[in-house]
Amino acid sequence: MVNIEIDGIPLKVDSSKMIIQAADEAGIDIPRFCYHKKLSIAANCRMCLVEVDKSRKALPACATPVTEGMKVFTHSKVAINAQRSVMEFLLINHPLDCPICDQGGECELQDLSMGYGEGVSRFTEGKRVVKDKDIGPLIRTDMTRCIHCTRCVRFGVEIAGVKELGATGRGEHMEIGTYVEHSLVSELSGNIIDLCPVGALTSKPFRYKARAWEMKAHPSIAPHDAIGSNIELHVRQNDVMRVVPRDNESINEAWLSDRDRFSYQALAHPKRLTDPMIKVDDDWQVVDWQTALETAIKGLQTIINKHGAEEVGGLISPTTTLEEAFLFQKWLRGLGVENIDHRLRQQDFSDHPQQYPLDNWTLGDVQESDAIVLIGSHIRAEQPILAHRIRQAAMMGAAVSNINFFLTDLLMPIEYEMAVDINTMLTTLAGIAKVLSTLMNDSDNDDEWQALYPERTPTAFEQNVAMQLSNAASATLIVGDLANHHPDAAKIRALVHKIAELSGSRCIVVPSANSHAHVIANTLPGKEAKNSLQMWQQSLRAYVLMGFDALHDTAVPVIAKQALKRASFVVALHSFDSEFLRQTADVILPMACFTETSGTFVGIDKQWQQFAGAVAPRGDSRPAWKILRVLGNVSHVEGFDYISSQDVVDEVRQIQAERHDKPIPPYIPDSLTVESDLMMISEVPMYRTDALLRHSEALQKTPETQRIQFARINRKEAEKHGLNHQTPLTLTQQDSVVRLPLEIDDSIADGCVYVATTTDAASRLVSLFGQVSVSQSEAAT
Amino acid sequence: MKLDQVCFRTNHLSPSWTLDAYRQVGGYQVLENILNNKLKPESIIEQIKNSALRGRGGAGFPTGLKWSFMPRRLPGDKYIVCNSDEGEPGTCKDRDILRFNPHQVIEGMIIAGYTIGAQTGYNYIRGEFFEPIERFEAALEEAREAGYLGKDLLGSGFNFQLHTHVGAGAYICGEETALLESLEGKKGQPRYKPPFPAGYGLYGRPTTINNTESLASIPVILQHGADWFHELGTPNNGGSKIFCMTGHVNKPGNYEVPLGTPFAELLELAGGVRNGHQLKAVIPGGSSTPVVPAEIMMGLDMSYDGIAKARSMLGAGSVIVMDDSTCMVKALQRIAYFYYEESCGQCTPCREGTGWLYRVVKRIEDGQGKQEDLDRLVDVAENINGNTICALGDAAAAPVVSFIKHFRDEFQYHIDHGRCMDNTA
């Protein structure tokens, strides 16, 4: 700690701090453009020049470390002169047309020019004009406005891990750009909109839609992944005009994924369901809520009375809130229904989500790990903010290893990586466990596990990863969606938990969106009841579906489609209309989106985050917790007298406190051998994980989304099956035959075909993760 | 007057740039002595300090002091970098050192590497120096063959390798930290200091960067002794210095003379001012140093402290002589254009200000000047001065301020009449 004085105010500050940090902490305002607390120091804008005693020149506060006895003057004549002259220089080539600039009203340059600029410019020469660059569907450029602070460049290098933006040219001719014009491909790219202090980089979807002063900011939580990024909804009248991050150091820091930033576009999509509807003689009729709810209850009760509650299945999207999840299962259980599940994309139910202890850790702990192993995870697409934390760990020297069905550029140094099929993945994980078990002298008391370990000597990969885990002071294992959606997911999870136990690592099974809340709320099948896969495969007479599309959000699209078509009664709570929904449902209850309701999300780190509604539900749609409350009332189920969603949360907390579940014994697989010839590996594309995202226009135009139409296979498999990239690939699964354009991609493991889910083609497949045969013929359709 | 005592000491030989020639003047003996007797780095630094050798690149920082900043015993890589990115208008001395006496630079760099604990050296040579690059490369080959570069030099256990790096035509890469960025393969832009290169230099490792002429002076200092070198010049301004005599002189060229030599003698050495003309002004140290009017200049001695008396700088010793035919507005326009063109664009005052200065000066030269332009030019220049990351901003500001200060009447005439005072220009 050192003693300094800023503007006569004595301060005690950490000696590692710069003047600007000390001033910020003390609430002393120093103007700045290039400085950003989360980025490296550039000291290039010179706006933060201050006077420091014993220095003959004004010094940049952002780059001058504090020293004992230092006296800083931020408003002295020297400081003000320096600041005003920098402002003049910044403005000479900057267009002074704030009224037609999209940043107008929330521009750092505009704001500071009010304090440090002159009313009239002394510059009478011609101004610089810079050609705009097209960097994709999310970000609009207006490069004449650029003040070359390089925040966007540093963000790319230091945070996003993509060196896509840089400076070319010298002096006045210096330009920020991508050199060769192309879209920015980063799941975090939108952050440069916030970082840009001027109107050079603005949001393309938001462009010219609203002014900062017309909008009211409402705090909320982003619903698309398990991070629960803190956001601010900017609302004008009753419309969410845009979404920006809200600082939360323990979760998303100052950042936001593009997915969370741009999904708001779907809120005003014409396909939003706005009225309750019932099907009368194959015809849809808009009805009042009373009629719709009564029709729903009547239909369900008829089936229950006639065939029993076991003929009803309740399926709910894990993107829904804790309150919605709790009321969903409480209502159905009140009707006697125990077929309840939220694990829509899961295929292996051999283990139970409650059997794994949820130890305490934060995202910050992950960032401080020395060793991280990713198992079956395309982490950048699944959890962009977690990927960023892992990247920061890697940059600080953590050893990151990756074992997956396909490898992609994770934009960080990777220690060891392997593209594997399921058998190799299982034996490799078992091999790692074996090395650890030998290291830990655990081999004597663990017969069931020992029997599973491979007899061969461990591979170099297994030994290296095991050594890194056992040597690390803090290690993290991450099981991603690709592992969790696999038909042998439980085997993977069991092995990874064993590795975690042996090496003392933390194990993170990445939840889908809010599924931690769903486990708490118990949207899980009751005893002897059916899980989501069984509900589809065993074809029930009635279904209650909430918040998802059966064709896109389930593991078995064709089977789900057949089950729904065969069912005699289907109630759907959803926010988006679709042809398929109209074909299969009997009652449609329009539910509000996350911005229109209050609720709770439980993040990957088990933090409960509550949020309030910011706008009224669209049309006559209603918050789902209210719909479920009335469904409970109309069905005369006890205990549905909630006044607010908070009452629901209170009840969940109380139940949780009183609950004393017997620990579930660990699941130990019988064998690790899996029948696998050619396996379809299916990934949920980053911008199509839920219905809201699938209706967000800009995100669907990104290069990432454009690529999802391709099936991908590596060269070796292509040769083995006689495939070439010029002819579409025919995928055959039982009766389903689907054709997709083919891309030869050596990042895919042997024995695997990569297919993206949520496409038209994918919705015609029997099982998204499963055996498949491939062929190519011009004639096939 | 003692000419060609230090960097040009092989000039009387033909060819002067071979290993043989260099050995004839005692080349590499100092290095051999150091390696064979394992001289203490501290004692070498002490001698350099005592010699009063000041950095020949322009700033005049004492070389011995700079070397003493290096954390010699820190384990890991350390670097010695020679700055041959000679780009200051008016300067052409390093070019000739590399052309005519490259081995002395090599020996200087090896000694520097030994002294500061660096095993790798880079000579960053200006990209347009085709012949000097070839000569230096050839000399490197000779030195490698002779065992002066490589592993375990002369059985001393000291390893040293030296590489040439060719610049790509940016003046700013002569600024030492921009040079390091460029050497790392990045866009040449100066770094903010602190940290200084001695702590965080090339690839983040301790690095010393010296000018070609400074490094070439090292073997001679150690051969003849610090006192000999110091006494060659004047107190606090040790040694001799190459002056690049350009402009309106009869015999333009490089002249290596003792520091402290009166300007009048130097001018005479260069054949005097162009016949039939009178001396009007001199830029004593390269285009970035303030211009000095003839009557003041004729009374100055050519040393760091001598030129400072006229509030200008010795700089790199690049003497630009201007006779009475020179239009000072046009001269300033050319200088202002240079800095406008060469600003790296990183920090605001220089990026925006150099273009502003150039455009206003050009307007005055073009006969479009306005009365308020003169005060505005000085004001803008002063707003750049001292507010930038590196010295390029100051370099762009100094000529503007000094030209207007000393020749305001010429600028005023341009504004009033839209042309030069004297139509001959």
Image: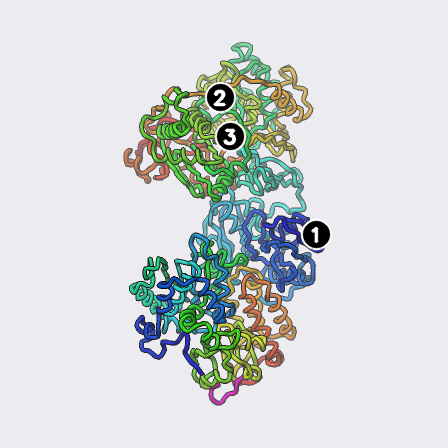
Q: Are marks 2 and 1 in contact (CB under 8 Å)?
A: no
Write down the residue under mark 3: A512
Q: Distance from label 2 to label 1 (Cα)?
A: 59 Å
* Residue type at tag 1: Pro
Q: Nearer the viewer, mark 2 or mark 1?
A: 1
Q: Distance from label 2 to label 3 (Cα)?
A: 15 Å
The answer to which of marks 2 and 3 sits earlier in the sequence is 2
- Determine whether A49 is above or below A398 in the image: below
Residue A738: horizontal and vertical position, in percent? 37, 30
What residue is rendered at 58% in x and 43% in y?
A254
* Residue type at tag 2: His
Write down the residue under mark 1: A10
Write down the residue under mark 2: A352
Comparing B424 with A34, the one in front is: A34
Q: Same chain for the residues at labels 2 and 1, yes or no?
A: yes
- Tell me where residue A291 sits by quadrant: top right
